[in-house]
Image: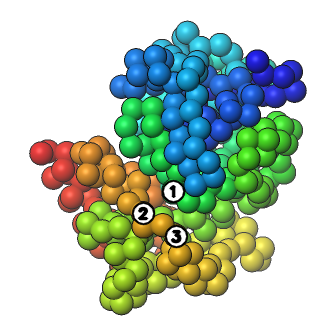
Amino acid sequence: MASSNLLSYAIIGTGAIGGYYGARLKQAGCDVHFLLRSDYEHVKNHGLVVESIDGDFALAKVHAYNTPSEMPAVDIVIVALKTTHNKSLPDLLPLIKPGGAILSLQNGLGIEGAITQSLLDHSINVPTILGGLCFICSNKVSPGHIRHLDYGKILLGTHDDSNQLCEAAPLLESLAADLQRAKIPIDTTLDLPMARWQKLVWNVPYNGLSVVLDATTEEMMADKGIRALITTLMEEVVNIANAWGEHISPGSQRGVSADVITQMITHTETMAPYRTSMKIDYDEGRPLEIEAIVGNPIRTAAAVKVAVPAMTMLYQQLSFLNERNRAQ
């Protein structure tokens, strides 16, 4: 039973991300409730299994649901859905306790703002909106079975509707304490939007090219020409981020350092060979998160007048492959 000082959680999207972090929180004694679709019967009857570089474990019994109306009210709803399913989010939310929050663990740009607008469009009171950037290599290999390959850190921040720097919400400190208790490395940021831009420096090239090239990270890094293309795409993301930072906060010098490019390439060279989340979605015939990860940054580039020819070509290629894949 969870102790009284721990928060209660609902996991919306029990896959590679939600399944892993939710299982860690449950293992640490938190009150965790999992909303599932196709895996519901399996997880209800057999629980969750996590293979991890930090130690394997199994949860024989978890609170599993296939409808949000049956879930209890919680302190924090963790949204780990693909962004392609966010239009359904208002129908998937359980009750949130007074003073509670929604935490998005999704990839891409403009995520928290889109969630806020969706709730408003459905006349739902908007709680505190938090964002979490997951630096993790994790896959769901079968129903209720998560394989954690590398990393695992979460960078947490609080959403501000005007995209300015934002002090941590009161609940974020308690959330951080629960995550640390669950042996999940965490850090916090006052600049959640720029943190999202920085993560896009990795996500745009590696997620996108993994689909276009039908390749793992290891295969891409082994080719000199593709490494150069990765660098070009990263440079374009950095250029948009810095122009956007100046546009939103003139004179503030908000931006992403070009040093990030070298750091990310170096880290990718040393990580376990990885099939990206977008590549897995493509291989499984699921819709790709093109708009959140590539489309939104390109539209921002147009607004701040930054040319991004490599990203535009990647977007066009991904859109074609996504449509053909869905038709098949």
Near mark 1 (Cα within 10 A), the count class, few <14, some 14-19 or many ≥20, is some
Mark 1 = which residue?
Answer: 149
Cα gap from disc 1 to disc 3, whole angstroms = 9 Å
Dot 2 falls on a residue whose secondary structure is loop
Residue closest to the eye, 143 or 260: 143
Q: Are marks 2 and 3 in contact (CB under 8 Å)?
A: yes
Q: Nearer the viewer, mark 2 or mark 1?
A: 1
Name the residue located 39 percent from the left edge and 43 percent from the top edge. 141
Amino acid residing under circle 3: Met
Q: Nearer the viewer, residue 233 or 140?
A: 140
Q: Locate the C terminus by quadrant.
A: top left
Q: Kindly identify which numbered label has been placed on residue 274.
A: 2
Instruction: Please tell me whether residue 211 is drawn above or below residue 257 in the rendered image.
Output: above
Secondary structure beneath label 3: loop
Residue at image x 57%, y 44%? 56
Q: Is residue 279 left or right of residue 158?
A: left
Q: Kindly indicate whether the residue at mark 1 contacts the one at mark 2 (C-beta within 8 angstroms).
A: yes
Q: Are marks 1 and 3 in contact (CB under 8 Å)?
A: yes
As drawn, is 151 to the left or to the right of 185? left
Q: Secondary structure at mark 1?
A: strand
The answer to whether 263 appears left or right of 208 in the picture is right
- Percent across and percent down for residue 267 are 57, 75
Q: Is residue 301 positioned above or below 129 on the image?
A: below
Q: Residue 271: give its label.
A: 3
Residue 228 position, x and y percent, is 40, 88
N-terminal of the two: label 1 or label 3? 1
Q: Amino acid at mark 1?
A: Leu
